Image (cartoon, helix red, strand yellow):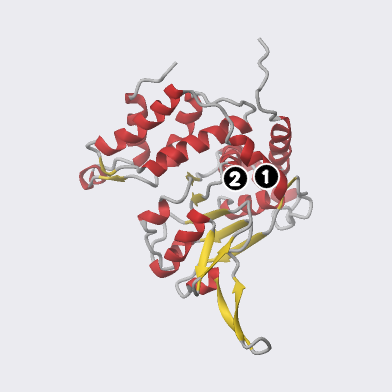
Amino acid sequence: MNYENRIDLSELSESVRKIREQVSQIIIGQSRFVDYLLTALFAEGHVLIEGVPGVAKTLTAKTLAKTLSVDFSRIQFTPDLMPSDILGTAIFNPKTVDFEFKSGPIFSNLVLIDEINRSPAKTQAALFEVMEERQITNSGSTYLLEKPFMVLATQNPVEHEGTYRLPEAQLDRFLFKILIDYPDLEQEIEILKGHHLHPDRTKDLSGIIALISKEQINSIQEKVKQVFVEDKLLEYIAKIISETRSSKSIFLGASPRASVALLNASKSFAAINGRDFVTPEDIQELVPAVLRHRIILTPEKEMEGLSTDQVIHHIVQKIEVPR
């Protein structure tokens, strides 16, 4: 049976296919990671990427950025980084005898923040407004950021010396928290072969070409909003989020922002897979990435060694799937 989409997703499908091909030239074994990044991009969300050093977190983000014809900036977070180093500051201009705002590196379309947990709370707080409202306020003036705007932030889950816990309010502003694991044996062999035959492949990204313009991304984001979601799936999302607030294993449940995040992410995930409608499988696939950074387990469950993903899995299994 042939199904014809009500929304023309041909441009999106072709763009996603080409991006996957481009990224796979540099990155081995991270196809799901790339799909999640594209899902977040087209859902107008931000992504927190967690993984041990050396699993290509930063390289994947840089490679993806190269496939997009957008402005890209990279910020290395350090303990001495100040909010003005990110947002910008007002500088006195002797010619005009007035202060002029000089924008910081956050004024870009795709912003990669390396080791986001290296900076203290004052610097983290500088990201609250810009991540949620796509604007900053300086000296009483508001400056809007150009669309599209996306933050990709990395952090190391193992090393804690010289790091700071991200505020819950900031974590809640990330659409996804993606966990990057080690490659399997076959993938690691392929990585070694690639480095042996082409030692500079991961350093030289000149072979990666830009495939989508800013205007195309904005257009795709608008199409994603039109993806159809049945009422019973909206209820399904609400039940999942509501269960995090009543579960005895969870100290802090997810907020309504999590419901909206799961909805938007599911619509985008369906679109990049060529569908203009959301299925229960789309929602189930994305629940861990949307919720794992938004809930806090009770101390008792943490002492038992229970993980947030295990609790999320139990919640999803508990709720009846609409058909």
Camera sees residue 29: no
Residue 100 in view of the camera = yes
| Residue at (56, 46) in percent of width and height | 44
Res. 134 image quadrant: bottom right
Check disc 1 and report the residue beneath it: 217
Residue 189 is situated, as x and y percent measured from the top left of the image, at 63, 42
Q: Are marks 2 and 1 in contact (CB under 8 Å)?
A: yes
Secondary structure beneath dot 1 equals helix
State left or right for residue 255 relative to residue 78: left
Q: Residues within 10 Å of mark 1 (few under 14, many from 20)?
A: many
Q: Is residue 280 above or below residue 105?
A: above
Q: In the current view of this chain or complex, which residue is farthest to the top?
A: 1
Q: Amino acid at mark 2?
A: Leu
Q: Which quarter of the figure has residue 93?
A: bottom right
What amino acid type is highlighted by mark number 1? Ile
x, y (%) of residue 162? 40, 68
Asked whether, in this view, residue 153 is left or right of residue 93, the answer is left
Between marks 2 and 1, how big is the CA–CA gap? 8 Å
Residue under pointer 2: 41
From the viewer's perspective, is the residue at label 2 or at label 1 nearer? 1
